Image (cartoon, rainbow, N blue to C red):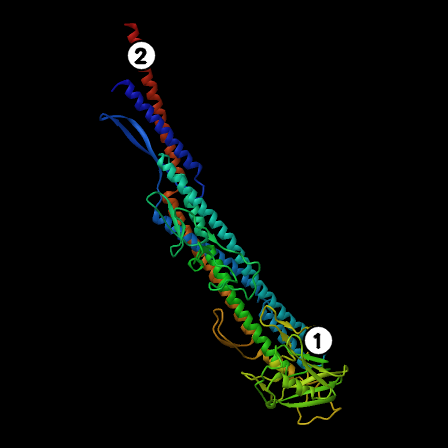
């Protein structure tokens, strides 16, 4: 072997070792870089004419287990979903208040209902007490306010989820564009013989960012492109980027819904005009969609059932009673017109009484002779001292002709509609509670402003009444006892939001709601822990297989430094031999 060949071999060793030291140093420097995989300089011998001429670095590669990466991507989606669900369910649980402490110190809806029970029980002992009436109205207002606040909180969470979907969609689109850009850079680098490992690491990181937001499938094409699809095969990245499209709602209320068949309402997620919302089953977006459209609406449905049943039960009782002194007018809550038919039977008694409860006038109306609301108005107008009309809102109004008198009703044997209820209850003439659900339930405004209008008495139901006689009970506990029984007795609740049908008191049903939410929050926390463990397991496996081992890389650098030193010494020796040879030639 000539000295020139020997020097060439030594120089190639020196150069190869420099590259290997550079690669190992980069590995150490990026040991803590998220998604970085260990790089290896692939070394090969060079041969010319069957004779070894040194060594060269043919490629810088990284070894990533593709099956393990797919498992890691899937686990990332599951963790994204679990993290979001757990966070929102914890917030939902907080909305329902704390059940710790006694009925008077706990902050849950069940505790507030129990406080109302206590207030009604106290009022029952002295129904005419102004202070106890005020306490009862205040306690009922607390229940209504808590129902409204909880409903508002649920809709706020839905609104937050809707806004978060928009932010997550933007993040996905950013990462999809990054992947498409990296696809081009990787192909360009590969075509020019440059290493692509670092670019592939960046692309895998972007893929995992997408996966944390939504479940996707992907594969690497023969040209080196990473192509990404939704669960059902809708392309997100192929030869180009197909971004997600989503429009955040300006506001979200209890009646806001997402419907693929409707052009209004909450937005779905689409790609190229195709709705892919149902294809996103996990990841942050999958959880947000489920929360916005399923989980939180189910909680609202349960709360609405509690509110509507509470209003219906209390109003059925209050419409059978009257305030003492009676109010100057009664306004219904049911929308009617003069032609609205009344499928009614039985008799209803309507009277005008003075402030002390003495009869001014009255009339018993045979509802079997009444066909429409207009007929009812005519019949009431036939009672001396009373007038009736339908206001601009479509509600029946009964007013005393004398400002010093008031209006009282005894539903007697009246039965209207199906299922049959008393006439006053049917028209909502003396409702205690107003509203159509938890979002707007409230104590009737005039009663809230004047607790003396709380129906605590009844109109005498005797066969005949005498003008000037006392016809309004003032000390009777009949109505208050009935309110208490309606609140504490068994009420039928239909299945909703994951709770089965049941027959419970209102406080017990509220406790069931709280328990249900708490159970879901606990399950979500357990699931989160499980998903964190799963991702950690796959991440550790990936790190063991493709991550940087600092001890190994440090030992490798030490070995390469020795190789570099040896190659340098070999070059020095060959140079010395060249010098000696030239000196010998010159001296001859």
Q: Which secondary structure lies at badge 2?
A: helix
Give the structural element (helix, strand or loop) at label 1.
helix
Disc number lying in front (1 or 2)? 1
Q: Where is residue 130 in the image (x, y as percent from the top left)?
A: 73, 77
Give how far across and how far down residue 513 sits, in percent.
53, 69
* The C terminus sits in image quarter: top left
Q: In which quarter of the image is the N terminus?
A: top left
Point out the residue furthest to the front here.
339
* Residue designated by label 1: 451
Say if residue 549 shows up in the picture: no
Q: Is residue 584 above or below residue 251?
A: above
Q: Position of residue 47 (x, y in %)?
A: 26, 27
Q: Which of 132 and 437 is in front in this view?
A: 437
The quarter of the picture where residue 282 lies is bottom left
Residue 466, placed above or below residue 196: below
Q: Name the residue under label 2.
A: 580
Mark 1–mark 2 distance (CA, rounded to whole Å): 119 Å
As drawn, the residue found furthest toward the top would be 588
Which one is in front, 406 or 39?
406
User: Local crowd at mark 2 within 10 Å, few (<14), some, or many (≥20)?
Assistant: few
- Specify whether 363 is left or right of 164: right
Q: Quadrant of residue 61 in the image?
A: top left
474 relative to 72, above or below = below
Q: In this view, does 18 lie above or below 200?
A: above
Q: Would residue 216 be found to the left or right of residue 342 on screen?
A: left
Query: Is residue 3 visible to us here?
Result: yes
């Amino acid at each position: 072997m000539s000295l020139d060949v020997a020097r060439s071999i030594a120089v190639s060793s020196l150069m190869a070792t420099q590259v290997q030291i550079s690669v190992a140093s980069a590995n150490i420097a990026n040991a803590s870089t998220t998604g970085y995989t260990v790089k290896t300089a692939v070394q090969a011998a060079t041969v010319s004419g069957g004779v070894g001429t040194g060594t060269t670095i043919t490629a810088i590669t990284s070894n990533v287990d593709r099956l393990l990466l797919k498992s890691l991507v899937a686990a990332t989606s599951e963790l994204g979903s679990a993290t979001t669900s757990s966070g929102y369910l914890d917030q939902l649980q907080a909305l329902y208040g704390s059940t710790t402490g006694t009925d008077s110190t706990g902050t849950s809806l069940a505790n507030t209902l129990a406080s109302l029970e206590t207030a009604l029980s106290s009022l029952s002992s002295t129904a005419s007490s102004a202070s106890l009436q005020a306490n009862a109205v205040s306690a009922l207002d607390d229940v209504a306010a808590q129902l409204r606040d909880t409903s508002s909180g649920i809709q706020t969470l839905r609104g937050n989820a809707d806004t978060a979907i928009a932010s997550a969609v933007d993040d996905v689109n950013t990462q999809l564009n990054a992947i498409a850009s990296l696809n081009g850079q990787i192909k360009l680098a590969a075509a020019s013989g440059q290493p692509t490992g670092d670019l592939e690491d960046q692309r895998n990181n972007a893929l995992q960012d997408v996966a944390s937001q939504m479940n996707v499938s992907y594969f690497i094409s023969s040209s080196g492109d990473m192509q990404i699809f939704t669960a059902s095969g809708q392309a997100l990245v192929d030869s180009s980027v197909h971004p997600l499209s989503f429009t955040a709602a300006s506001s979200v209320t209890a009646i806001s819904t997402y419907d693929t068949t409707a052009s209004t309402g909450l937005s779905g997620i689409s790609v190229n005009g195709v709705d892919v919302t149902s294809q996103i089953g996990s990841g942050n977006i999958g959880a947000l969609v489920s929360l916005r459209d399923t989980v939180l609406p189910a909680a609202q449905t349960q709360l609405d059932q509690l509110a509507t049943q509470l209003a219906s039960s209390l109003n059925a009782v209050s419409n059978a009673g009257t305030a003492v002194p009676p109010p100057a007018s009664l306004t219904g809550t049911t929308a009617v017109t003069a032609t609205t038919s009344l499928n009614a039977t039985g008799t209803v008694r309507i009277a005008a009484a003075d402030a002390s409860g003495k009869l001014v006038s009255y009339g018993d109306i045979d509802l079997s002779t009444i066909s429409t609301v207009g007929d009812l108005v005519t019949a009431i107008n036939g009672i001396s001292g009373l007038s009736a009309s339908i206001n601009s809102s479509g509600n029946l109004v009964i007013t005393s002709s004398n400002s010093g008198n008031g209006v009282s009703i005894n539903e007697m044997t009246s039965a209207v509609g199906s299922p049959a209820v008393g006439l006053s209850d049917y028209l909502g003439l003396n409702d205690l509670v107003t509203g159509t659900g938890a979002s707007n339930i409230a104590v009737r405004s005039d009663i809230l402003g004047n607790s003396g209008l709380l129906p605590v008495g009844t109109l005498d139901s005797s066969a005949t009444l005498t003008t000037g006689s006392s016809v309004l009970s003032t000390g009777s506990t009949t109505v208050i006892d009935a309110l208490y029984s309606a609140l504490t007795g068994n009420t039928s609740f239909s299945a909703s939001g994951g709770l089965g049908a049941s027959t419970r008191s209102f406080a017990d049903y509220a406790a069931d709601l709280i328990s249900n939410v708490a159970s879901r929050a606990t399950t979500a926390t357990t699931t989160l822990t499980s998903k964190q463990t799963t991702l950690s397991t796959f991440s550790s496996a990936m790190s063991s297989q493709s991550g940087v081992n600092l001890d190994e890389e440090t030992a490798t650098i030490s070995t390469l430094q020795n190789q570099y030193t040896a190659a340098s010494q070999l070059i020095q020796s060959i140079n010395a031999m060249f010098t000696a040879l030239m000196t010998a030639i010159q001296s001859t």
